[in-house]
Image (cartoon, helix red, strand yellow):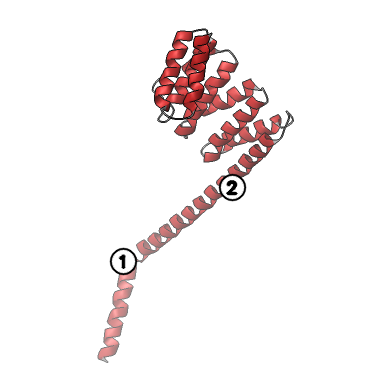
């Protein structure tokens, strides 16, 4: 009988606890399940977005590798899709650089410039943004837009880009006929390059300009 009473007390205590906390417990369980389902759904969405972006990036690379001008439309379309729909992915910034290079190779300087200007404005990939500024300065130099080209190289260069920025600045100044300033910029590049083999190319520029 004592055993039955003890069991009944336990059941009554459990019923009382459930009446007091049961609703809250079920709400917490459903909340945890909802969070878990949302997390898994977000993971799936992120994976799906990454796969889609990778597909456009691979299509862009394939179009860029094709010879001739027939691939220009595909290059621009794939790049536009990456920028419009997958700007937050790592593929967008890299795709823009591929597209800009491919368009520049095809002498579509306006197209290359448009690509690079987008990346310069983008703040999700600072390292690639620094590359975009350097390449944009080169495109503007090719278009003989010297002041806008120099503007891309103003300020303190990003880490690892001091020599590249100084070298490109020298190229622009030389194209403007500002020989003394060009030599000064190239000498700044030499200081940053140190024993790098690229220093020989910069020195050749200085020698050629001084010889002229």
**Mark nearer the N terminus (2 vs 1):** 1
Residue 170 in view here: yes
Front of the two marks 2 and 1: 2
Q: Nearer the viewer, residue 155 or 182?
A: 182
SS at mark 1? Answer: helix
What percent of the width, then of the height, locates residue 194? 41, 27
The residue pinned by badge 2 equals: 51
Label 2 – label 1 distance at C-alpha: 48 Å
What percent of the width, then of the height, locates residue 17? 30, 70
Q: Which mark is residue 115?
A: none
Q: Which quadrant does the C terminus fall into?
A: top right
Residue at 29 percent across and 79 percent down: it is: 10
The residue pinned by badge 1 equals: 20
> Would you say 113 lies left or right of 24 here?
right
Q: Which quadrant does the N terminus fall into?
A: bottom left
Q: Residues within 10 Å of mark 2 (few under 14, many from 20)?
A: few
Residue at 42 percent across and 30 percent down: it is: 160
SS at mark 2? Answer: helix
What percent of the width, then of the height, locates residue 156? 38, 23
> Would you say 186 lies left or right of 13 here?
right
Q: Residues within 10 Å of mark 1 (few under 14, many from 20)?
A: few
Q: Residue furthest bottom?
A: 1
């Amino acid at each position: 009988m004592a055993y039955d009473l003890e069991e009944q007390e336990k059941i009554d205590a459990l019923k009382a606890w459930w009446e007091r906390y049961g609703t809250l417990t079920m709400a917490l369980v459903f909340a945890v399940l909802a969070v878990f389902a949302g997390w898994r759904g977000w993971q799936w969405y992120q994976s799906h977005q990454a796969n889609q972006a990778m597909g456009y990036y691979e299509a862009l690379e394939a179009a860029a590798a094709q010879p001739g001008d027939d691939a220009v439309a595909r290059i621009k379309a794939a790049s536009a899709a990456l920028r419009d729909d997958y700007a937050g992915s790592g593929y967008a910034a890299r795709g823009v650089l591929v597209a800009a290079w491919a368009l520049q190779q095809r002498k579509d300087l306006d197209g290359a410039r448009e690509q690079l200007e987008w990346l310069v404005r983008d703040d999700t990939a600072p390292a690639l943004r620094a590359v975009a500024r350097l390449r944009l300065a080169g495109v503007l130099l090719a278009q003989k837009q010297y002041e806008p080209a120099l503007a891309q190289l103003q300020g303190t260069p990003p880490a690892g880009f001091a020599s590249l920025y100084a070298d490109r600045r020298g190229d622009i100044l030389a194209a403007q006929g500002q020989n003394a300033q060009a030599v000064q910029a190239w000498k700044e590049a030499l200081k940053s390059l140190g024993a790098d083999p690229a220093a020989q190319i910069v020195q050749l520029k200085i020698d050629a300009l001084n010889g002229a």
